[in-house]
Amino acid sequence: MEKINLNEIPNKPGIYIFKDDYDEPIYVGKAKNLRKRVPSYFNKNTSWKTKRLTSEAKSVSFVVSQNEANALLAEYSFIQEFKPKYNIQFKDDKSYPYVTITNEEWPRAFVSRNINHQNVNFGPFPFIGAAKRSLDHLINIFPVRTCTKNTFERHQKLNKPCLLYEIDKCSGPCVDLVSKDEYQNLLSNLREFYKGNSDTYINEKIKEMQTLSKNQQYEEANKVKITLSHLENARVSQTLMTSNDKNVDVIGIDIGRYDVVLSCLLIRNGRIVGEVKNNFEPMDVQDYENYLPKIIINLFEKNMPSNEILVSHEFPLSETIQKELENKWEKKITLINPKRGWKKDLLNTAIDDAKELRRVADLKRRSDLEFRSLSLEQLQHKLNLKNIPYRIEAYDISNLGDKFRVGSMVVMEDGISKPSMYRKFHIKSFKGQDDFRSMEEVIFRRVKRLINNQEKDQSFRRYPDLILIDGGKGQLSKAKSVIDHFKLDIDVIGIAKKEEELFSPNKKSSIVLNSNSEALFILQNIRDEAHRFAIQENRRLRLKDLDIESIFEIKGVAKSSIDMLLEKYKTLNKLSSASYKELSSLIDEKQATKVYQYFNK
């Protein structure tokens, strides 16, 4: 997409929506001033992700608002509804589990993900199993009802308690086997435990057990010991964080090069009663002032916050977030970035937890890297390369006669394809069809950008350990001549598709790797990716130059077959992406072959 005219952009607050070929939203953002913000996406020094967005986008639309705060809320609502692929995706937006005590004549305790303000809710818990186990342990001590309304009423009519009463996990309120005062006392103890006041109750039980044991009442002491076991198991996830009885939610954020890690600790009465951990990949990780408000809104979309939320970063729209959360949860809520005291200590704990999340994730990646590194070392040994090829760049040429001449550069780092580093070249230096000269031009343009000290593109700035040419000795020779011209010490090899032969400069005989070797698999993988990427751009150029009428000129394909395909696929873009199997299911195989080759040859 080309940079749009400034006069077409509103000079007001609002949201901007990038859309693709199908008029589908692919990214939405907010701005205090749309006219100042949107043109920044078309600057030359933007990130690869922004460049990819603007290259895929075909149009931008705008929705103005009264102020930036309203724009933020509109942006969040739009993201939740349309889930544009370049925005932060809150994939796991289900609510966390809570232990709920209902507001009934005989209140019920149960685990739920849905918060009803008429009930009393404790949590959230990190996962459903923790909540269920916690309640199960406490029901052994405070046997309140856990059954549904239908079950409760059915046993009232039968005048007979259920099995839970028989195993001492219910006090039998359905048939008046417990008085209302006694039942309320059980509920009160249950509430106090979940409020974080478990220490007092446990300490009392410890003293009681010690007294009974001292008086040689061992049977009674053992019963108290069992009770203590249930209490300890029920609060196993509640770590003491502060000696006071404060309720806070603490959000620690660690910003990496490509992603953001968040750890939110939910503290009630000084204890951690739940935690939320997430990874996000925003458009620009350094622009946290833009994405942090959306993250916080989503975090408490279905999870009730405490009255105070501690956040590791300051951002300009915190008051807007406060008001939004206050309106939703109907209580006073404050967002702060503490600088000292016990609140700062809690925040540091959350930040350290986020850093630990990143360390563990990096460790997992490194363990995978060990296997890939062995494959790369094998590749170095088999091909007698100067260095282990941690960064491999593969190149391929695609054209249709003397038209739509495209060169592709794909990148593999540490054995993993890096689509963000892929680049494409349109052949410009000559006319006609010549794969050798095309490869020479592509490598020349790539290397020239490598040696340019002012180069801004992150992919072109990086030095390859190995350049892989899709082709035989001819293409390899041209690529090597360019490397030698610039006096660079970079290994170059070619790979021929027919027998998967590998060619090295200045060597007559080819190298054939074992068909089961990981080294060959790596080269095949990146070669195929270079071929696919070149074909993709070639197809894009051809489709841009085609119209519907042109495909009726495919030799050997009947007009009725073309009509059938167009009725099915509607557009050239969709038709060109159809597989041979899909085409042959609609028209005969010979015609399907010709149509497939027309778009993919």
Image (spheres, grey):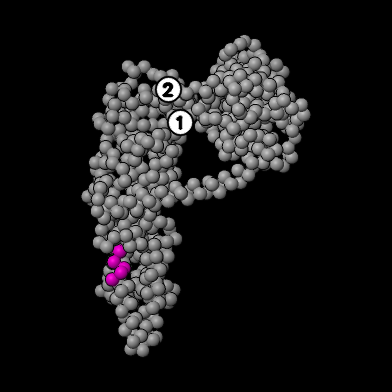
Instruction: Estimate the spatial distance between the alpha carbons at disc 2 and disc 1, rounded to whole Å.
Output: 12 Å
Spot occupied by residue 510 in the image (x, y as percentages of width and height): 75, 30
Q: How many marks?
A: 2
Spot occupied by residue 38 in the image (x, y as percentages of width and height): 36, 25
Please identify the dominant SS of the magenta region. helix
User: Which residue position holds label 1?
Assistant: 49
Residue drawn at x 29%, y 76% is: 204
Which residue type carries mark 2? Lys
User: Which residue position holds label 2?
Assistant: 44
The residue closer to the viewer here, 291 or 392, is 392
Q: Secondary structure at mark 1?
A: helix
- On residue 441, which mark appears? none
Q: Quadrant of residue 345?
A: bottom left
Residue drawn at x 24%, y 53% is: 341
Which residue type carries mark 1? Lys
Is residue 197 in the magenta section? yes
Q: Work out which residue is located at the far right of the displayed protein and give it.
A: 509
Spot occupied by residue 195 in the image (x, y as percentages of width and height): 29, 63
The residue closer to the viewer here, 127 or 156, is 127
> Bounds of the magenta span?
196-200
The residue closer to the viewer here, 519 or 384, is 384
Q: Give left or right: position of 500 versus 177.
A: right
User: Residue 470, relative to residue 117: is it above or below?
Assistant: above
Q: Secondary structure at mark 2?
A: loop
CA neighbours of label 1 inside 10 A, class few (<14), some (14 to 19), many (20+)? some
